[in-house]
């Protein structure tokens, strides 16, 4: 191998090593800001054989258990239980809850696992289905009959082909 080829190979090797090192450092730095998503069952029983660690930042999604919401009358603190198909997890949150938050509603909370089955949330998001309509629009549409697409009549076109 001639010296010029050896020099090129060394430069390519060094550049490759630097790129791999930079990517590795970026992934390591981003590891702390990743929020893993869990359900209440996965927090209690584990996900893929691993339970989240106390102090770990995570997201949890589930349904608010009816009758579990308790509010502090002197502050914005609220506590409620989340459930999926198994055990419940207690979520505590201090702040203003979303307008769509209610018992029996699906929510996603971002926070820190403080104890097995207990989460201190920094953010609570209420989920809604595709039937959601902002209150202002719902008020304007009162009295207008809504037809769902699957219930729409079939019309014949001039070439005889039916369309919806």
Image (cartoon, grey):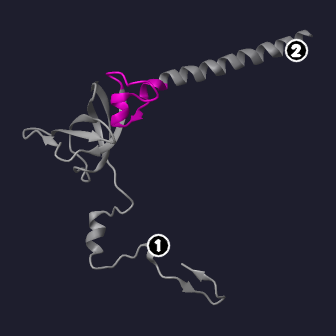
**Nearer to me, 70 or 142:** 70
Labels 2 and 1: the sequence-earlier one: 2
**Nearer to me, 2 or 150:** 150
Quadrant position of the C terminus in the picture: bottom right
Q: From the viewer's perspective, is residue 58 above or below residue 129?
A: above
Q: Position of residue 85 (x, y in %)?
A: 34, 42
Residue 55 included in the magenta stretch of the image: yes
Residue range (magenta):
30-56
Foreground disc of the pair 2, 1:
1
Quadrant position of the N terminus in the picture: top right
Q: From the viewer's perspective, is residue 10 above or below residue 134?
A: above
Q: From the viewer's perspective, is residue 104 above or below residue 89?
A: below
**Nearer to me, 146 or 6:** 146
Please name the residue that numbered disc 1 is placed on.
150
Q: Which mark is residue 5?
A: 2
Q: Position of residue 61 (x, y in %)?
A: 35, 41
Quadrant of the image occupied by residue 70 = top left
């Amino acid at each position: 191998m001639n010296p010029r080829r050896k020099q090129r190979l060394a430069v390519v090797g060094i550049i490759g090593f630097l790129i791999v090192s930079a990517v590795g450092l970026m992934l390591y730095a981003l590891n702390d800001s990743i929020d893993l998503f869990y359900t209440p069952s996965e927090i209690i029983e584990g996900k893929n054989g691993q339970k989240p660690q106390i102090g770990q930042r995570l997201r949890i999604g589930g349904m608010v258990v009816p009758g579990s919401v308790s509010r502090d009358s002197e502050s914005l603190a609220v506590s409620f239980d989340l459930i999926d198909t198994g055990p419940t997890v207690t979520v505590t949150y201090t702040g203003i809850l979303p307008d769509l938050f209610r018992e029996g509603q699906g929510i996603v909370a971002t926070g820190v696992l403080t104890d097995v089955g207990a989460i201190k949330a920094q953010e609570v998001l209420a989920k809604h289905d595709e039937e959601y309509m902002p209150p202002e629009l719902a008020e304007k549409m009162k009295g207008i009959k809504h037809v769902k697409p699957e219930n729409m009549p079939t019309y014949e076109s001039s070439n005889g082909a039916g369309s919806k």
